Structures are given as C-alpha cells and as structure tokens.
Image (cartoon, rainbow, N blue to C red):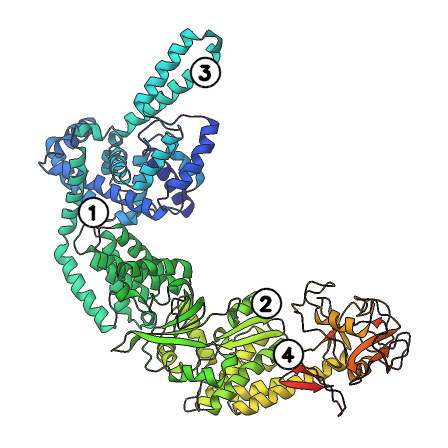
Amino acid sequence: MEFCPVQSNQIQNIMRSVLQILLSSLLDTPFVESQTNQEKAISILKAYFTLTPSQMTIAYQDSYGYALIVISAGLMAPKKFADPIERHYLQPFAKEHGLSSKDLLTFQSNVAKSLKFFAKQKDQLFQIEEMTDEDLMALISYKNTTELSDLVLEQMRRIAPLDDTLAAFLRFDGQLGDSLLFFFCEIVRKKEQLEKTQAALQREGLCISVRQFQEKIEHFKGLQKNVPSLLNKITQQLTGLQQAYSAWQSHYEQLIRFSKHFENGLEELLKWAKELYSTLIYEDQSLLEKSLQKFTELMARQNLSSQIKVRDEFTHHKTANLKLIREAASQLKQLSPQNPEYNRFSLIVSSALSSTGQLEPAENFLLQLLENQTTNEEKALAYSNLFQVLLRRQAYTEAFKNLQSAIALDAQKYAWHDIYKYPPEKLLGAGGMGCVFLCRNNNKLIRKEWVMVKCFWENLKSFKEAIAMRDIAAYYILEPLDFGYLEIFKQERAFLVTEYIEGAIDGESWLEKNGPMDLKMGLTVGLQIAKALQLAHKVGIYHLYLKPANVLLKETETGIAVKITDFGLSQVASSLRSQAAASQGEFSKFGQAVFASLDYVLPESGKSNEANDIFAFGSTMYRFLTGLNPRPFSQDKLPEAPTLRHLLFDCIKGDISAQQLFNDLKAIEDSYMDKKREAFRYTDNGNGTVTDNKTGLIWLKNANAFGRQNWKAAMRSVANLADGQYDLTDGSIPGMWRLPTEKEWKAMVNNKYEKPALSNATGTEHWQDGDAFLNVQMSYYWSIADEELTNFAWYVYLYYGYVDITEKSNYNYVWPVRDGQSLKIITEKSNYNYVWPVGDGQSLKI
C-alpha cells in the first residue's frame, strides 16, 4: 500500500506535466514546425484557445472518472465494451503476473470496487491553477504520453492508499493514461474554443490536414526532379515536412492506443462511460435524497435558501451545522453532474457555504453548475448568486457581469431597479444599505445624461425624508431625482435615483489615495458636514449612518466640495448593522465594511438620534484627520489644535447639539485662518496667482503682464483675462478678474517700505524681485474706482505707496486681482457705486 503526501511544488510540477500532455493531444492535424510559425501560433492560441484553468480542470476530472469506471466495468460487467478491457489489458496483465483463475476473480472484484471509490473522488484531483504561454505551446507540440499513467497514480495516492498491484494494472500498457486521454479529447474537441483555434491555425497555414501534408510532400518530390537549381532549398523543406509528418504520426499512434481497441464504437463508448458514471452515483441516490431533505431543513431553520442574500453572511451557525455543511460540500464534490439532483444540490450547498464565509468553494460550485446542463431558471439563479458572492469580495466588475447575465435571463426577478428607465452601465459599489449603479438616463423628465441608482437590500417604506432633504440642505447632499419600487403593490425592492457627480470619491477612497487630511482641509470638510447636520436636525431629520464612506468629496476650483449620501434613509441601515453586530466569525471584505460601520454608532443605547449623529460626526472627522479607526479615540493622534480636539471629544460624548457644533467649528476655522494670515502675508498658489493672506484677495503673479494702458483699455484687458493666459492655470474665466479698488490698494501696500512699498512673502521684510510677485514696477498702477461722471480715476504709486486720482487718458500699469474665498475688508461708506462678491454670501461696496 502506498499513500504519499505531496508538497505544493511537487503538485505544481505534476499538474504542469499533466496539462501539457493533455493539451498536446487535442489537435488532430499536423503542425508545420518553424521558429516563425511558433511565434505566429502563440498569438493565435492566446486569442482563440480561451478555455479557463477551471474548465480544463473539470474536463480532466471528468475524463479521469470515466476512465476508471469503464476499466472497472470492463473487469466485471458482461457488456459490449467490457471485452476489449479484458482481452487487451486484464488477461495479458494476469499472464505477466502469474495470477491463477481464482486469484484473478478476487483481483477483479477488489480492483472494480477500488476503482469505483477512486472514481467518486475525481474532484480531489489536483487543480489546474493557470495556463502559461509554455503550456499553450504544448498544443502544437508532441509530448510523450507514456508518463501520464504515473502522473495520475501520484494524485490517486494522495487521495487514499493505493494497492501496488492495482497501480501496476492501471500502469500496464499505459491503460490509465491512454483511456483518460481518449475521454479528455472527446470532451474538449466538441468545445467551440478548440474548433476556432484549429480553424485559425489552418487559415494561417500553420496546421494542415494529413491529405494536404501528403500532397505537399509529393509536390516537393516533383520539384526536386524538375527544378535542379532549387534542389538544396527544396530538399530542406521536404525533409522538414517529412519529419513533421513522421512526428505527428508517431504521436497520433500513441493517442489512439486505447480507442483502437473499440473499433467503430467510439461515440457509443463515451455515452456508455457517462451512463456508467451516473449509475455509480445512483447507487448513493437514497443517501443523497436523505441528505437533501436534512440539508433543506437546516437551510429553512437558518432562514437561508438557494438564493443568496446579503444578510446571509451574518448568519450564526452552530458547530453541528458547520459540520453538516462541510459534509454536504464533500458529498457534492463526489456527485456526478449528470445526477438529476446535482443542480439543485449545488445551488443549496453553495448558498450555505457563502453564509459561512467560504466564498471560493461557493464560487467554484456555481461556475461548475453553469458548465453543466441547466435550465434558464437554474442558470439565472446561479448568475445572481455569483453576483452576491463576487460583491462580497468587492470584485465589482465581475459581479456586475454576472448580474447582467441573470437579468438577461429573467429581468423581472433579478433586476434591482427599473432598468428600462435607467439602464445600468457599471456597479459603483455596495454597502450595508444596498448597491449603487451608474446608469444612463432614459427618463425624459430628468435632464441628465447619467444618474446614480441606489438599490436597497431591505424594504424601504418611505422616501419622504430623503426627498425633503433636497429643499433643506440641497448644497450638501446628492440631489434626489426619482424613486420607486419594482414590486409596487408590496412596496418591495426599492430604489432611489440621484445625480451623478463625475470625479467625486467617497471618504474612504480619498484616504486610501491621499492619506489623512491636514487641518485646513479637515476644517473645510467638517464645516460642510456640520452645516448639513444642523439644517437637517432643525427639522427633525437624522442621518444615523454617517461615516467616511457616505461622504463624497470632489476637488473644485475653490476647494473641496462635500456631498453626503444616504440622508433620510436611516430606517434601512439599522437591521443589517444590528445583525452584523450579533454575528461571529470571519467576514468577507463586504462584511468587514458593514461591521466596521459600527465604529460610527454610539455604543450607549437610549441616546437621542441627534447624539448618534454627533457621535458619528466626531468619529468620521477623527478618521479623516488621522487615517485611523475611531475606536479607540485618542486625542493625541489629532492635529495640534486643542480647541478642535476638545470639540471632537465632546462629539464622542454626544454632549453637543448640531447648531453648537457648527458654531464652534466655524470659530475654530476663523481662528485658524486669522493665525495663518498673521503668519504669512503672501502665498504662491503655483498656478500663476498669489494669495494675499491679509485680505484674501488673489493677485496675478506677473505684475506687468499688460504694460502701460489707459484706464478704459485696462478695464477691458482684465475683464478678458482667463486661464491659459500669462501662465495662468487656475481655471479662471473671463469676468472673474478686475482692477483693485482704492481700499484694496491701501491694504496691499506697506508704507514702512518704498521702491516699492511692498513687503516680502512672509510680511517681515522689504520686497525683493521674484519674492511672491514678478515684474513689479515702481510706478503708477490703475484702480477700478473712478470719480463718478468725471474723466478721473484712482491709481496707486508703488514707489512710495500713496493713492491718488489722475486722468483716465493717462497710461499706467495694470495689475489684475480677483476675489478669494474669505476676503474680509471693512469698508467705509463712500460715493463709489461698485459692488463685488467676496465669498460666503457677502459683498464689498466700493
């Protein structure tokens, strides 16, 4: 008896050899060997021979099962196809090993029993994990098949102890390898991938039929006689063809050693093998029926079914249930795909496995089922279940493909929203509430090309709050456009349609891409979230599912814009989140994300909804500012800003209102900006502009872009200034730039200095050429302000820094400016009638 544990590197070497022998058996026409032809062939093989490693594994395992069961039947059954096994293998083997008639009967009985056992274990053979270019080249090579029997026997020894005499019998005259190759070729040759591959090789002249081969050889022989000048070249080509034909013929003889014993009954032989294998499995049919009944009862108790649901992952299984699921999976591996119960059992077992977190075996069973003979109903369910399995490991592209396949077979059952109004183009993501699709818009009432559709795992009875948020805090949420139910009368399978913002990413993706936010950005983002909470809480609407993944961020010209998702949908999230909290065991990536959302839920029960939102805000901002999970909450990890640390800690305690939160956060931002302005006078923005931190104004970096102009020409020049001119890359458009006002010039100059009257970037020393600004002229610069109904306008004389008036017809320098985000200049009443926006809904009267 031999039982050999095999190391992983040995497994890889064995399967590489097996795969290459299998592939080398498939083409039924000779390959014309040459270096050029090999290079052309590999590109064809990659393009057309698209059978996956999984599909090749199934074909290999099925061939192994058929081979063993036919050999087993040939030992015992008085059938049409049994005689060749006995005559060509059993009797010669018995004679060689000196087996008496009595010993032979015992041997036959034992071998038949053992082969049936090993045939049932076909799914325990080594898997084909990948197909390399070297493997594909085996298709056009001639591998020696004699070692295949030994390679398969090595795998059988890994399954169970193998009797030495049985191994010798299977090895005898290549019986095991030859029979396996026969069935493998019969299975794979019917697949369109191989047919297309062979057709492409023949079109390129890389493979030719035997008849064509012989005709070419005769043609070259004739040329040898009639064209003596090309004798050497023709002789070389003729020799090459003869060698190729001889190699193919020798290889072909190896391949048909088994099948030639069965004369003209090859099609019947394959059919007989399948029937025998099915009969083998039917022997266990009563056991299977009992298992199915027992397993179905288990599924019902656990609220599971053959259709995989999102909440299945959070099912709590007892040890006895887990054992039963493992046993069922093992039984399914031994079950023939021809068994009438195979598909039903496969769907149930894969669903159960997915509920325990075993996604890979669940996926494999579903893929194998799709290779089998299935009804459209079974196929659609398998595709839908694959969508759920792939979604859990966040393989969104593959998940979407499988969902589309399910919908193509049964849209009424498997679509998640109205796919005719909003055809889905991409699965954007999934979370505890539902999944989100990017869709084209066919709804003529909505004037947008693209929309996002959120489809909910659980029932949602009302969209009232979600729609109300459009009027309450429209600037801070995704605009709701439509909603509905696929099952209108039951109000089930709800979906919500919102605007799609290209380029926006959720907070977790932002952190992964950019790392933790700095204090300035954190305050900008936090203020927008706090404002949304303040507006919603004011009318009694609460989020209750706030977390970084529900905060969309987009970079704009003016900073970071925030959109909060899932506002007004809190009723959906709670049940799945509660089930995750009570669950045990390991989760998939999807399950981990749902479980992680508990970090943003107030631990103490009985607290108000407002306190829960404030706690979630504090936890979300902690994650944004540190990149760490909010539990445990450590103030030391936050930026060096004591007032902000205290505020976020108050949020974690839930002891602050949304209104107070916004007010305190705004005060912190104002203090931060004041300190920043005090710390540094000018900031080079790197886009052709410089920000004056004292006033918030943005100046063109080049102080002499336009030369000298009269006042009217200067007004026109700055009005037309935009991105792309004078090294500007700030995204500005015509109409954004203007001349500075009289007051702004007074704020700009520093009378401590002269030649020119400007400070350096830090605001601590005299300006030097190239410090913050370029080409500053110690001369006269126009102001926008003019004396009403006169020909005079204001200017600044930068040599000394004083402001005065002069005639508009004079020629002065032009230095454009535009408003910043937080311009704060206190102005006195004047006779000037210009009003300019300066941000935050304020305006500056000039």
Which residue is painted at 21% across and 52% down in the image? 335
Q: Residue furthest left?
A: 78
Question: Of the numbered discs in the image, which one, if any, rests on residue 639?
Answer: 4
Quadrant in the picture for the C terminus: bottom right
Question: Of the numbered discs in the image, which one, if any, rests on residue 236?
Answer: 3
* Disc 2 target residue: 514
Quadrant in the picture for the N terminus: top left
Q: Quadrant of residue 30?
A: top left
For badge 1, the amino acid type reads Phe
- Label 1 to label 4: alpha-carbon separation: 67 Å
For badge 4, the amino acid type reads Pro
Question: Of the numbered discs in the image, which one, if any, rests on residue 117?
Answer: 1
Mark 1 and mark 2 in contact (Cβ < 8 Å)?
A: no
For badge 3, the amino acid type reads Gln
User: Could you tell which of marks 2 and 4 lies nearer the N-terminus?
Assistant: 2
Q: Position of residue 582 (x, y in %)?
A: 36, 78
Q: Is residue 352 visible?
A: no
